[in-house]
Image (cartoon, coloured by chain):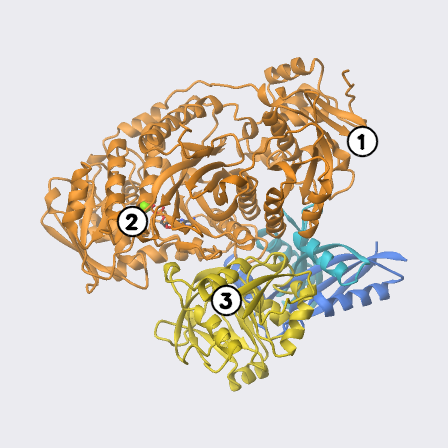
Chain colours: A blue, B cyan, C yellow, D orange
Amino acid sequence: MSRFRVSVNISPRQGILDPQGKAVAEALHSLEFADVRDVRVGRFIVMQVDAADGATASQRVREMCDKLLANPVVEDYQIASVEES
Amino acid sequence: MSRFRVSVNISPRQGILDPQGKAVAEALHSLEFADVRDVRVGRFIVMQVDAADGATASQRVREMCDKLLANPVVEDYQIASVEES
Amino acid sequence: MKFGIVTFPGSNCDYDAHHAVTDALGAEAVYLWHKSHDLEGVDVVILPGGFSYGDYLRAGAIARFSPIMREVVAHARRGGPVIGICNGFQIACEAGLLPGALLRNAGLQFVSEPVRLRVENQDTMFTNRYSEGDLLRLPVAHGEGRYTADAETIERLEGEGRVAFRYVNAAGEVDPAANPNGSVNAIAGIVSAEGNVLGIMPHPERAVDPLLGSPDGLGIFQSMMAHVSA
Amino acid sequence: MPVSVQPRPGDPVITPALVAEHGLTQQEYDILVAMLGREPTFTELGIVSALWSEHCSYKHSRPVLKTLPTQAPYVLQGPGENAGVISIGDGLAVAFKIESHNHPSAVEPYQGAATGVGGILRDVFTMGARPIAMLDSLRFGSLESARVRYLFGGVVKGIGDYGNSVGIPTVAGEVMFDASYEGNPLVNAMCVGIMHERDLIRAKAEGVGNPIMAVGARTGRDGIHGASFASEDLSEASDAKRPRVQVGDPFTEKLLLEASLELIASGHIVAIQDMGAAGLTSSSAEMAARGDVGVTIDVSRVPVREEAMTPYEILLSESQERMLVVAKRGHEEDVRAILTKWDLNAEVIGEVIAEPVYRVTEGDRVVAEFPGSRLVTECPVYTPEARESDAIRALRERDVASIAELPEESDPVWTLERLLSSPTVASKRWAFRQYDTTVRTSTVVPPGDGDAAVVRVRGSEKALAIKTDCNGRYVYLDPRNGGRTAVAEAARNVACVGGRPMAITNCLNFGNPKRPEVFYQFREAVAGMGEACRALGTPVTGGNVSLYNENPAGAVYPTPVIGMVGVVESLDHVTRSRFPGREDAIVLLGEPTDELGGSEYLASIHGIVAGQPPRCDLERERATIDALLEAIAAGLVHSAHDCSEGGLAVALSECAIGDPERLVGAEVSLDKWSDLPLRALLFGEAQARIVVSTPDPQRVLDVAARHGVPAHTIGSVRPGSDALSITAAGRTINAPLTRLARAYHEAIPRLMTVGAAEPAILEQHPKPAEV
Ligand SMILES: Nc1ncnc2c1ncn2[C@@H]1O[C@H](COP(=O)(O)OP(=O)(O)O)[C@@H](O)[C@H]1O
Ligand SMILES: [Mg+2]
């Protein structure tokens, strides 16, 4: 049994209006960051998971996402990283 | 000039109370995910940036974080990925 | 008849709902504790407004796993009336009692103000005391009230007359300026396919007394009363 | 037998530099050594630096505060407790208190304001009262600056998010903008709670052998030395030693609120207090001092959030949403059961002891010990030199009547629009639209509908009228008169909605008291407040002092914010400020004068802050309030609105266009004052004036006459008309309502959407774009 640091990215589904992303893009433009577009703002979750190996750890986190962390109606998720800690 | 997909992870600073992470951890425990701890909830931002190369693109996004995207008083940020799109 | 008002950790309109049911409607109401497994024989369950579990992660996401919710869902499956107000609407969606989701307001700010609603369907157990087209004045107070669902779901809701209330302007017309949160089709309240679950973002329980600006919300509770005692 | 206190291994040695870093003067350090009869340990130094900080000790303000009136038959609890308490009859009582969170908000506006709300809520519910309303009194620099927009946006969102989540309506307040607050915003939050008199509980440790319990959130390294931090000028320096920002958790606060009220009702505890500024240290030391008992605390039993925390850190942490409870011996499990029901912790961390000492142990090692309550009672007190600044006197004595009008002023509508769109005057809906104003279903008059908020008291025919007020410009130019005026305006606002002013709480926001001109302002302003409180019969039941509100540019305007609580005897008396939709007569209680000093007109049209501010005649104020309340009780008044910033023309406009969905015209003649300069007549800020609409002007005039209050019928409401028309000095000014409404309602939203740093964009707030 060892401990892993697992991180997940949860972002609004394609096609779902993301007013936050839009507002950030506008704010960036008015700050002379003309060279940016398509900003999407989502959630970033990091946690420590005890598991036999990395694969199991990331499997556990998937279950957490399906059950609680992400809302399939409007969000997609992606395991971003799994590191032994 | 080409276009890059840059993603940033912004999370509450070490030691700064993260009530959201705390609530999520407790919820996960009550859902029989006993094997998880230290949950931290932050923001995940993806955007398209036009730049000469990847290094410049990520440099630009750093500037955006310093100026607008992250609040240095309570948050740390990290460029998670830079991909030519 | 008896109303049960669920108190989740962070609920803060349970008191308002209790006031509406007992003082304004004159019916019986009991608080149902989130850790309980007993609905105490209530006829109607109210999922009240507030910030259950701080609205952390997503509004309603954590509350839906409370022990009492298993009984509430069973009650709904048996056809028992459930009304989810504001946070209660969000919880009902997360629990699958209603389709769709409630996202951050399009304007990104918390919005607290009186809005106008148009009654879209008078043939539900929650609206039988109104007539279609009636204009109601109710307060909204939420940061995540933008109703969203996929195109087919919206089509079905509209087609089956399950949109109970819509945000409208003084003239009774749908108008982006009168839509406080950017909800699809200005949807403010919907009912379930079986018609026994209502989700509504504005607060009828806070509009039961002219002294406080409007009594227009009372009709929803009277409708349920009429339905259940019928 | 005296136990020996040894330094902990790893403690830094006490050097003069370390002492200075802890904000203690050499003289204060000597007092400490004399008290202990030895050198303090590092832990003891930390404890003292917190308790003797301005924020906790009031060392520069106490003597002056003592001059304030605090007595009335209905005052159940005056200054000295977590909140003041007054009886409103029927066995019901009201607890209320205001507090500042200026320095934290300047560093992190969102969390700073949010935790300010959390702290003041706890002060009220630890008295045994259920919070039923919040108010916020805010001061910022100019909204032209992106940094200020960031601060304003972040503060408003922080107040809203916290209060909304806990479920307490935010129902009134004020916001003013002036360059003097640049870099040092003022964020004052007030909470009002209701209770049965019998539930009143005091934070007084009692009963030898009673266990002391830590309740609520765990302790982390948040905001260590926040109290001393709040007692310094904001400068680059304080940036370096900035305490780690305290993050608020309104969810835990809501649980703590319910658990605490249940705990108090249960009878299992004898005292409860918030662990606020200087956390565990001040709460335990103050409770011990009040009860005049000894206490011993074992820091190793305090539930912590982080590893390897030292006694120093645990004692000084300002982690939020924590309470210190003195339970009845043998009832520990009952206490724990109630907290557990609400998913919160409760741990026994100490005990009330007979021995007159304040002792802190870490396991069985004693890390700090002080004789009795001398730690609290023997804190040095200062009365610094006070001298008025010559520069400010010169400003006051300047002849402002001779200031030439701008060419544009030949059209008074131009001037009126400018004033209505000045952020200080303009509608604050942008802010209070983000506050849940209707939760608890008791808000009778919400923000924007009246001069004060009205919140009904369930189970009685009564309601509470509440409002905060202070015009810092007046206080700056003439502290004593300004102090009087702050109290008078708050009382007037409360009366305008039908409330009888009862008592005040106050938040004294001033600069560095060691500067004679600042201490002069402080002494004089408080003296003026005291005079007004005596004249109006509104004793002071508590408050808060925030000094060192300075930035490199100097001190903020002296800003003694008054939080007034009044009682509306019958719900039929509730009165709003908008003109009714009927042809009422308009009566002006009080009279215009030629006073222009310190006016919004001079500030926003001419960019000048100078002249003698309008005189505050307390007898007149009292008579005016009495007359208004009598007229209201007689059912003669359909609307009432006092004249404040912008004067009579602005007050009339607000009555006409205050409700953007229902503009109501009016026709007014001020010809009888043709001898006054037009701009003073329209925009001067003479005090003790109230615009009233009534179906029966003669009876209103009779009531006024009986109270010796000058009153005149000045026109009538014209629901049909689309203009506010004012005849003065023979000419008629026709102001289209739509233009006035646009100026008044769109000013702040327009300003808040310019520029990049829109704080609402991200849930956590983006750094402002420096301009
Ligand atoms: N920050 C705020 N929070 C809540 N209500 C506010 C705030 N600022 C202003 N208001 C409300 O706006 C109205 C006008 O307030 P104010 O500008 O102080 O008017 P006046 O000068 O006539 O007293 C009042 O109802 C007041 O409570
Ligand atoms: Mg007023």
Residue C121 location in percent, x, y? 46, 81
- Cβ–Cβ below 8 Å for labels 3 and 1? no
- The residue under label 1 is D363
Is any atom of residue D554 visible in this view? no
Which chain is home to disc 1?
D
> Which residue is drawn at the image coordinates 40% and 71% (left, top)?
C136
Q: Would the CB of label 3 be found within 8 Å of ligand 1?
A: no
Q: Would the CB of label 1 be found within 8 Å of ligand 1?
A: no
Distance of mark 2 from mark 3, alpha carbons?
52 Å
Residue B32 location in percent, x, y? 79, 62
Mark 1 or mark 2: name the one nearer the start of the chain: 1
Whether labels 2 and 3 belong to a single chain: the reply is: no
Which chain is home to disc 2?
D
Q: Quadrant of the N terminus of chain D?
A: top right
Q: Amino acid at mark 2?
A: Leu
> Which residue is drawn at the image coordinates 52% and 81% (left, top)?
C162
